[in-house]
Amino acid sequence: MATSHRAEAKRPAPRLYLVTPAVEDAAGFSGMLRDAIASADIAAVLLRLEPAGERDLINRIKILAPLVQQNDTALVLAGNPEIAARAGADGAHLIGIEAFLAAVEGLKPARIAGCGGLATRDDAMAAGERGADYVMFGETEAGGRRPSFEAIIERIEWWAELFTVPCVGYAATPKEIGPLAAAGADFVAVGDRIWDDSRGAATAVSEAASLLAAPETAT
């Protein structure tokens, strides 16, 4: 197996991974995104896009990519691996092991290949063995379904104990950030709650970073 037991050395502090809403007006969204990234240490941004023609998608990505990358933050596309290089993105996030396996060779080694939507432990291990840069647990599936939070925590603890490939835990609410970090997630993804926060995305991201920094005190 390509995966192996983690070293006993202290694990690096977990970092935030922002997940955008489905963006149609990239220029209109750019200010909110810029402020959010500037408010905390962000490892990566997962850019979701409203469906459109290829040229339109590339143009949207080219507007937003420099805002993200100038902060040494990776811009990862939600799907669309075939345009990642031409649009200047750092990689792509694929949902499901089949989609990941179909795209990974076209992304690696130059670009990030992430995988979510992993229904079983076998799928997660297969993604790791085939070169995933990270696996994600806990995101909402099609139709709004999501595993129980207890099951998500169990999966992250299992992965963190046994494998070297980083894992991302998806926090549906701020209360989940601390427990995901404490369970062993290398990155904690935050999404819709950030952009919908009435205080503004920058304030919400700053709060998320505070919860991430002190997982033992998060409630």
Image (cartoon, helix red, strand yellow):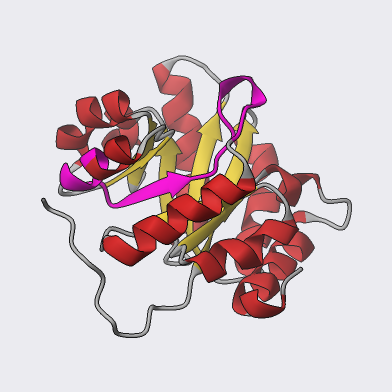
In the picture provided, is 77 more to the left or to the right than 63? left
Residue sitting nearer the eye, 55 or 43? 43
Does residue 71 appear to the left or right of 94 in the view shown? Answer: right
Q: Is residue 87 left or right of residue 199?
A: left
Nearest the eye: 28 or 216: 216
Q: Quadrant of the C terminus?
A: bottom right
Image location of residue 33, percent across then percent down: 64, 52
Residue 85, quarter of picture: top left
10 is higher (above) or lower (below) than 98: below
Q: Residue furthest right?
A: 198
Q: Quadrant of residue 50?
A: top right
Position above or below: 81 against 36: above
Query: Would residue 1 be seen by someone viewing this image from the given angle?
Result: yes
Residue 170: give x, y in percent of width and height. Answer: 56, 49
Tell me if residue 87 comes above or below residue 199 in the rendering: above
Q: Indicate whether 90 appears above or below 47.
A: below
Q: Quadrant of residue 108?
A: top left
Q: Residue at x 69, y 51 (%)?
A: 31
Task: Give the residue displayed 78% in from the left and 64% down from the top.
Answer: 203
Q: Position of residue 195 (x, y in %)?
A: 74, 47
Left or right: 106 in relation to 178? left
Identify the residue at the far top of this view.
53
Q: Which residue is at a point 74% across and 47% down the rendered structure image?
A: 193
Q: Residue at x 59, y 34 (%)?
A: 140
132 falls in the magenta region: yes
Residue 5 covered by magenta stretch: no
Q: Which residues are magenta?
A: 126-146
Q: Is residue 66 visible?
A: no
